[in-house]
Amino acid sequence: MTILVTGGAGFIGTHTLVELDAADHSFVVVDNFSNSSQKALTAVEKITNKPICFFDVDVRNEEALQQIFENQAAAGRPITTVIHFAALKSVSESVSHAVRYYDNNIGGLLKLLGAMTKSNVNNIVFSSSATVYGDPEALPFEENHPVRPKNPYGHTKAMAEQILDDWAKQDKKNKAIALRYFNPIGAHPSGIIGEDPNGVPNNIFPYITRVALGHLPWLNIFGNDYSTVDGTGVRDYLHVVDLAKAHELSVRYLEKSSEGFFKAVNLGTGTGTSVFQLVQSFELQCGVSIPYQIATRRNGDVSSAWANPQLAKNLIGWTAKLSIADMCRDGWNWQYKNPRGYN
Protein backbone atom coordinates (compact mmCIF):
# COMPACT_ATOMS: atom_id res chain seq x y z
CA MET A 1 0.00 0.00 0.00
CA THR A 2 1.30 3.43 -1.01
CA ILE A 3 -0.28 6.76 -0.14
CA LEU A 4 -0.14 9.76 -2.45
CA VAL A 5 0.09 13.00 -0.44
CA THR A 6 -0.67 16.13 -2.44
CA GLY A 7 0.62 19.37 -0.94
CA GLY A 8 2.89 17.28 1.25
CA ALA A 9 5.47 20.07 1.68
CA GLY A 10 3.00 22.30 3.51
CA PHE A 11 2.53 22.86 7.23
CA ILE A 12 0.04 20.06 7.88
CA GLY A 13 1.39 17.92 5.06
CA THR A 14 4.91 17.67 6.47
CA HIS A 15 3.65 16.74 9.92
CA THR A 16 1.39 14.10 8.38
CA LEU A 17 4.34 12.59 6.50
CA VAL A 18 6.11 12.11 9.83
CA GLU A 19 3.08 10.33 11.30
CA LEU A 20 2.64 8.15 8.20
CA ASP A 21 6.28 7.10 8.45
CA ALA A 22 5.93 6.37 12.17
CA ALA A 23 3.03 4.04 11.32
CA ASP A 24 5.14 2.29 8.61
CA HIS A 25 3.17 3.59 5.64
CA SER A 26 4.87 4.10 2.29
CA PHE A 27 4.09 7.38 0.56
CA VAL A 28 4.95 9.63 -2.34
CA VAL A 29 4.51 13.40 -2.38
CA VAL A 30 3.17 15.79 -5.01
CA ASP A 31 3.71 19.53 -4.57
CA ASN A 32 4.33 22.47 -6.89
CA PHE A 33 5.92 24.49 -4.06
CA SER A 34 3.75 27.52 -4.84
CA ASN A 35 3.25 28.18 -1.13
CA SER A 36 5.84 25.84 0.40
CA SER A 37 9.50 24.91 0.17
CA GLN A 38 11.32 21.81 -0.99
CA LYS A 39 13.48 22.37 2.10
CA ALA A 40 10.48 21.32 4.18
CA LEU A 41 10.70 17.84 2.67
CA THR A 42 14.44 17.77 3.40
CA ALA A 43 13.55 18.60 7.01
CA VAL A 44 11.11 15.68 7.12
CA GLU A 45 13.90 13.43 5.86
CA LYS A 46 15.98 14.50 8.86
CA ILE A 47 13.23 13.36 11.22
CA THR A 48 12.43 10.08 9.46
CA ASN A 49 15.99 9.35 8.31
CA LYS A 50 14.56 8.23 4.96
CA PRO A 51 14.52 9.79 1.49
CA ILE A 52 11.20 11.11 0.22
CA CYS A 53 9.94 10.31 -3.25
CA PHE A 54 8.39 13.54 -4.51
CA PHE A 55 7.16 15.01 -7.77
CA ASP A 56 7.12 18.71 -8.62
CA VAL A 57 3.64 18.59 -10.15
CA ASP A 58 0.58 20.84 -10.06
CA VAL A 59 -2.54 18.84 -9.12
CA ARG A 60 -4.36 20.46 -12.02
CA ASN A 61 -2.13 18.41 -14.37
CA GLU A 62 -4.22 15.27 -14.66
CA GLU A 63 -1.91 13.61 -17.16
CA ALA A 64 1.10 13.99 -14.84
CA LEU A 65 -0.91 12.62 -11.90
CA GLN A 66 -2.06 9.62 -13.90
CA GLN A 67 1.54 8.94 -14.91
CA ILE A 68 2.53 8.87 -11.23
CA PHE A 69 -0.22 6.34 -10.51
CA GLU A 70 0.85 4.18 -13.45
CA ASN A 71 4.56 4.32 -12.61
CA GLN A 72 3.97 3.39 -8.99
CA ALA A 73 1.82 0.43 -10.03
CA ALA A 74 4.43 -0.73 -12.56
CA ALA A 75 7.10 -0.59 -9.85
CA GLY A 76 5.05 -2.82 -7.59
CA ARG A 77 4.10 0.04 -5.23
CA PRO A 78 0.51 0.79 -6.26
CA ILE A 79 -1.16 3.83 -4.74
CA THR A 80 -4.30 2.83 -2.85
CA THR A 81 -5.16 6.04 -0.98
CA VAL A 82 -4.74 9.78 -1.52
CA ILE A 83 -4.43 12.46 1.16
CA HIS A 84 -5.30 15.71 -0.58
CA PHE A 85 -3.85 18.85 1.03
CA ALA A 86 -2.92 20.80 -2.11
CA ALA A 87 -4.97 24.02 -2.08
CA LEU A 88 -4.78 27.76 -1.63
CA LYS A 89 -5.84 28.59 1.92
CA SER A 90 -6.05 32.31 2.77
CA VAL A 91 -9.53 33.58 3.55
CA SER A 92 -8.62 37.22 2.88
CA GLU A 93 -6.76 36.42 -0.34
CA SER A 94 -9.67 34.35 -1.57
CA VAL A 95 -11.90 37.43 -1.45
CA SER A 96 -9.65 39.43 -3.76
CA HIS A 97 -8.63 36.46 -5.97
CA ALA A 98 -11.82 34.39 -5.98
CA VAL A 99 -11.49 32.93 -9.49
CA ARG A 100 -7.93 31.83 -8.77
CA TYR A 101 -9.16 29.99 -5.68
CA TYR A 102 -11.94 28.21 -7.53
CA ASP A 103 -9.58 27.27 -10.36
CA ASN A 104 -6.93 25.87 -8.00
CA ASN A 105 -9.02 24.31 -5.25
CA ILE A 106 -11.94 22.95 -7.26
CA GLY A 107 -10.08 22.44 -10.54
CA GLY A 108 -7.28 20.60 -8.73
CA LEU A 109 -9.69 18.24 -6.97
CA LEU A 110 -11.53 17.43 -10.20
CA LYS A 111 -8.30 16.62 -12.03
CA LEU A 112 -7.13 14.49 -9.10
CA LEU A 113 -10.39 12.53 -9.02
CA GLY A 114 -10.13 12.07 -12.79
CA ALA A 115 -6.67 10.54 -12.46
CA MET A 116 -7.78 8.42 -9.50
CA THR A 117 -10.79 7.08 -11.40
CA LYS A 118 -8.68 6.13 -14.43
CA SER A 119 -6.21 4.39 -12.13
CA ASN A 120 -8.82 2.61 -9.96
CA VAL A 121 -7.79 4.44 -6.78
CA ASN A 122 -10.87 4.66 -4.58
CA ASN A 123 -9.82 6.18 -1.23
CA ILE A 124 -9.29 9.85 -0.40
CA VAL A 125 -8.76 11.85 2.78
CA PHE A 126 -9.64 15.47 2.05
CA SER A 127 -8.31 18.52 3.85
CA SER A 128 -11.44 20.54 4.63
CA SER A 129 -12.10 23.34 7.09
CA ALA A 130 -14.49 24.57 9.76
CA THR A 131 -14.97 27.64 7.54
CA VAL A 132 -17.66 25.63 5.75
CA TYR A 133 -20.00 26.29 8.69
CA GLY A 134 -20.09 30.10 8.59
CA ASP A 135 -21.93 31.74 11.49
CA PRO A 136 -22.83 29.33 14.28
CA GLU A 137 -26.49 28.56 14.94
CA ALA A 138 -25.34 26.78 18.10
CA LEU A 139 -22.07 25.75 19.72
CA PRO A 140 -20.20 23.50 19.63
CA PHE A 141 -20.27 22.96 15.88
CA GLU A 142 -21.49 19.49 14.96
CA GLU A 143 -21.19 17.91 11.53
CA ASN A 144 -24.93 18.27 10.90
CA HIS A 145 -24.72 22.05 11.34
CA PRO A 146 -25.83 23.91 8.17
CA VAL A 147 -23.00 24.51 5.69
CA ARG A 148 -23.05 28.23 4.90
CA PRO A 149 -19.53 29.53 4.19
CA LYS A 150 -18.99 33.29 4.06
CA ASN A 151 -15.99 33.62 1.74
CA PRO A 152 -14.65 32.05 -1.47
CA TYR A 153 -12.13 29.88 0.39
CA GLY A 154 -14.91 28.39 2.50
CA HIS A 155 -17.05 27.93 -0.59
CA THR A 156 -14.28 25.94 -2.30
CA LYS A 157 -14.13 23.59 0.68
CA ALA A 158 -17.91 23.18 0.81
CA MET A 159 -18.08 22.59 -2.95
CA ALA A 160 -15.26 20.06 -2.73
CA GLU A 161 -17.14 18.15 -0.04
CA GLN A 162 -20.23 18.03 -2.27
CA ILE A 163 -18.14 16.78 -5.18
CA LEU A 164 -16.66 14.04 -2.99
CA ASP A 165 -20.10 13.07 -1.74
CA ASP A 166 -21.33 12.70 -5.32
CA TRP A 167 -18.13 10.87 -6.33
CA ALA A 168 -18.70 8.36 -3.53
CA LYS A 169 -22.28 7.80 -4.65
CA GLN A 170 -21.36 7.14 -8.27
CA ASP A 171 -19.35 4.01 -7.43
CA LYS A 172 -19.80 1.82 -4.35
CA LYS A 173 -16.02 1.34 -4.13
CA ASN A 174 -15.35 5.07 -3.66
CA LYS A 175 -14.68 6.20 -0.07
CA ALA A 176 -13.96 9.74 1.12
CA ILE A 177 -13.41 11.40 4.47
CA ALA A 178 -13.39 15.20 4.68
CA LEU A 179 -11.58 16.37 7.81
CA ARG A 180 -12.92 19.74 8.94
CA TYR A 181 -10.01 21.39 10.74
CA PHE A 182 -10.56 24.04 13.34
CA ASN A 183 -7.37 26.03 14.20
CA PRO A 184 -4.13 24.02 13.94
CA ILE A 185 -1.06 25.59 15.58
CA GLY A 186 2.20 24.40 17.16
CA ALA A 187 4.95 22.37 15.49
CA HIS A 188 6.77 19.07 15.67
CA PRO A 189 8.54 18.88 19.07
CA SER A 190 11.91 18.44 17.35
CA GLY A 191 11.73 22.02 16.07
CA ILE A 192 12.80 20.75 12.63
CA ILE A 193 9.47 21.35 10.86
CA GLY A 194 6.79 23.96 11.51
CA GLU A 195 4.57 26.63 10.01
CA ASP A 196 6.32 28.94 7.55
CA PRO A 197 3.80 31.24 5.81
CA ASN A 198 4.93 33.55 3.03
CA GLY A 199 4.91 37.25 3.91
CA VAL A 200 2.87 38.60 6.81
CA PRO A 201 0.99 35.69 8.41
CA ASN A 202 -2.79 35.47 8.02
CA ASN A 203 -3.17 33.27 11.10
CA ILE A 204 -2.68 34.38 14.68
CA PHE A 205 -0.06 31.95 15.96
CA PRO A 206 2.75 32.58 13.43
CA TYR A 207 1.98 36.28 13.91
CA ILE A 208 2.55 35.87 17.65
CA THR A 209 5.86 34.06 17.12
CA ARG A 210 7.10 36.72 14.71
CA VAL A 211 6.23 39.42 17.23
CA ALA A 212 8.15 37.39 19.82
CA LEU A 213 11.19 37.37 17.50
CA GLY A 214 10.92 41.11 16.93
CA HIS A 215 10.15 40.68 13.23
CA LEU A 216 6.80 42.43 13.77
CA PRO A 217 6.25 45.27 16.27
CA TRP A 218 3.01 44.08 17.87
CA LEU A 219 0.07 41.76 17.57
CA ASN A 220 -3.18 43.20 16.27
CA ILE A 221 -6.15 41.83 18.22
CA PHE A 222 -9.25 42.37 16.13
CA GLY A 223 -11.96 43.28 18.62
CA ASN A 224 -12.15 43.14 22.41
CA ASP A 225 -15.90 43.69 22.74
CA TYR A 226 -17.25 40.25 21.86
CA SER A 227 -19.57 38.43 24.25
CA THR A 228 -16.78 36.11 25.42
CA VAL A 229 -14.85 35.49 28.61
CA ASP A 230 -12.59 38.51 28.05
CA GLY A 231 -14.06 40.24 24.99
CA THR A 232 -11.69 38.67 22.45
CA GLY A 233 -12.59 36.04 19.88
CA VAL A 234 -12.66 32.39 20.96
CA ARG A 235 -11.41 29.57 18.76
CA ASP A 236 -10.70 25.85 19.00
CA TYR A 237 -6.91 25.55 18.67
CA LEU A 238 -5.40 22.09 18.20
CA HIS A 239 -1.85 20.84 17.95
CA VAL A 240 -0.71 20.09 14.40
CA VAL A 241 0.76 16.77 15.56
CA ASP A 242 -2.66 15.70 16.86
CA LEU A 243 -4.13 16.82 13.55
CA ALA A 244 -1.55 14.85 11.58
CA LYS A 245 -2.33 11.68 13.54
CA ALA A 246 -5.98 12.00 12.49
CA HIS A 247 -4.96 11.65 8.85
CA GLU A 248 -3.10 8.42 9.52
CA LEU A 249 -6.11 7.04 11.41
CA SER A 250 -8.38 8.10 8.53
CA VAL A 251 -6.21 6.19 6.08
CA ARG A 252 -6.53 3.08 8.22
CA TYR A 253 -10.31 3.51 8.38
CA LEU A 254 -10.61 3.87 4.61
CA GLU A 255 -8.41 0.87 3.92
CA LYS A 256 -10.41 -1.47 6.14
CA SER A 257 -13.87 -0.28 4.97
CA SER A 258 -15.55 -2.32 2.26
CA GLU A 259 -18.52 -0.15 1.22
CA GLY A 260 -18.32 3.28 -0.36
CA PHE A 261 -19.22 6.39 1.63
CA PHE A 262 -18.57 10.08 2.22
CA LYS A 263 -18.17 11.39 5.76
CA ALA A 264 -17.34 14.87 7.05
CA VAL A 265 -15.57 14.85 10.41
CA ASN A 266 -14.67 17.69 12.81
CA LEU A 267 -11.12 17.87 14.13
CA GLY A 268 -10.82 20.02 17.24
CA THR A 269 -10.28 19.76 20.97
CA GLY A 270 -13.84 20.65 21.87
CA THR A 271 -12.59 23.58 23.96
CA GLY A 272 -12.56 27.28 23.07
CA THR A 273 -9.58 29.52 23.88
CA SER A 274 -9.72 33.31 23.61
CA VAL A 275 -7.04 35.40 21.93
CA PHE A 276 -5.99 36.86 25.29
CA GLN A 277 -5.80 33.37 26.80
CA LEU A 278 -3.64 32.18 23.91
CA VAL A 279 -1.29 35.15 24.26
CA GLN A 280 -1.04 34.67 28.02
CA SER A 281 -0.28 30.98 27.63
CA PHE A 282 2.43 31.76 25.08
CA GLU A 283 4.04 34.32 27.39
CA LEU A 284 3.95 31.87 30.31
CA GLN A 285 5.35 28.91 28.39
CA CYS A 286 7.94 30.77 26.35
CA GLY A 287 9.01 33.59 28.66
CA VAL A 288 8.51 36.24 25.98
CA SER A 289 6.26 39.29 26.28
CA ILE A 290 3.90 39.92 23.36
CA PRO A 291 3.00 43.59 22.84
CA TYR A 292 -0.40 44.05 21.26
CA GLN A 293 -2.88 46.67 20.20
CA ILE A 294 -6.64 46.46 19.86
CA ALA A 295 -7.93 46.90 16.33
CA THR A 296 -11.48 47.04 15.03
CA ARG A 297 -13.31 43.82 14.34
CA ARG A 298 -12.76 42.24 10.94
CA ASN A 299 -15.74 41.71 8.69
CA GLY A 300 -16.89 38.11 8.79
CA ASP A 301 -15.27 37.16 12.10
CA VAL A 302 -17.53 35.33 14.53
CA SER A 303 -17.16 35.78 18.27
CA SER A 304 -16.76 32.08 19.12
CA ALA A 305 -16.23 28.77 17.36
CA TRP A 306 -15.31 25.37 18.66
CA ALA A 307 -15.95 21.79 17.68
CA ASN A 308 -17.78 18.78 18.95
CA PRO A 309 -15.12 16.15 18.09
CA GLN A 310 -17.15 13.11 19.19
CA LEU A 311 -17.61 11.73 15.68
CA ALA A 312 -13.83 11.63 15.15
CA LYS A 313 -13.52 9.53 18.30
CA ASN A 314 -16.35 7.21 17.33
CA LEU A 315 -15.37 6.80 13.67
CA ILE A 316 -11.57 6.74 13.52
CA GLY A 317 -10.62 6.52 17.20
CA TRP A 318 -9.09 10.01 17.35
CA THR A 319 -8.99 12.51 20.18
CA ALA A 320 -6.78 15.55 20.64
CA LYS A 321 -4.24 14.88 23.40
CA LEU A 322 -1.94 17.92 23.42
CA SER A 323 -2.69 21.12 25.33
CA ILE A 324 -2.52 24.82 24.56
CA ALA A 325 0.72 24.86 26.59
CA ASP A 326 2.15 22.13 24.33
CA MET A 327 1.09 24.07 21.23
CA CYS A 328 2.76 27.27 22.43
CA ARG A 329 5.94 25.53 23.56
CA ASP A 330 6.41 23.51 20.37
CA GLY A 331 5.44 26.35 18.05
CA TRP A 332 7.92 28.70 19.70
CA ASN A 333 10.63 26.01 19.67
CA TRP A 334 10.31 25.79 15.88
CA GLN A 335 10.25 29.54 15.31
CA TYR A 336 13.13 30.26 17.72
CA LYS A 337 15.33 27.63 16.06
CA ASN A 338 14.27 28.76 12.58
CA PRO A 339 13.76 32.53 12.79
CA ARG A 340 13.46 32.79 9.01
CA GLY A 341 11.60 29.55 8.53
CA TYR A 342 13.01 27.21 5.92
CA ASN A 343 14.92 30.09 4.32
Image (cartoon, rainbow, N blue to C red):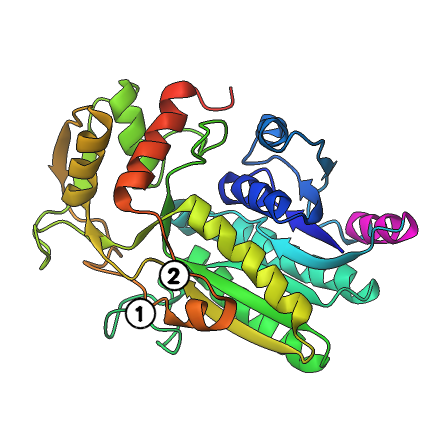
The kind of residue on which mark 2 rests is: Ala
Whichever of labels 2 and 1 marks the residue nearer the N terminus, that label is: 2
Look at the numbered disc 1 and give the secondary structure of its residue. loop
User: Residue 110 lies in what quarter of the image?
Assistant: bottom right
Q: Position of residue 28 (x, y in %)?
A: 72, 44
Is 69 located above or below residue 160 in the figure? above
> Foreground: 144 or 59?
144
The kind of residue on which mark 1 rests is: Phe
User: Residue 48 lies in what quarter of the image?
Assistant: top right
Residue under numbered circle 1: 141
Q: Position of residue 82 (x, y in %)?
A: 67, 57
Residue under numbered circle 2: 130
Chain part drawn in magenta: 64-75
Q: Would you say residue 339 is visible in this rendering?
A: no
Query: Is residue 104 in the magenta section?
Result: no
Judged by its main secondary structure, the magenta piece is helix
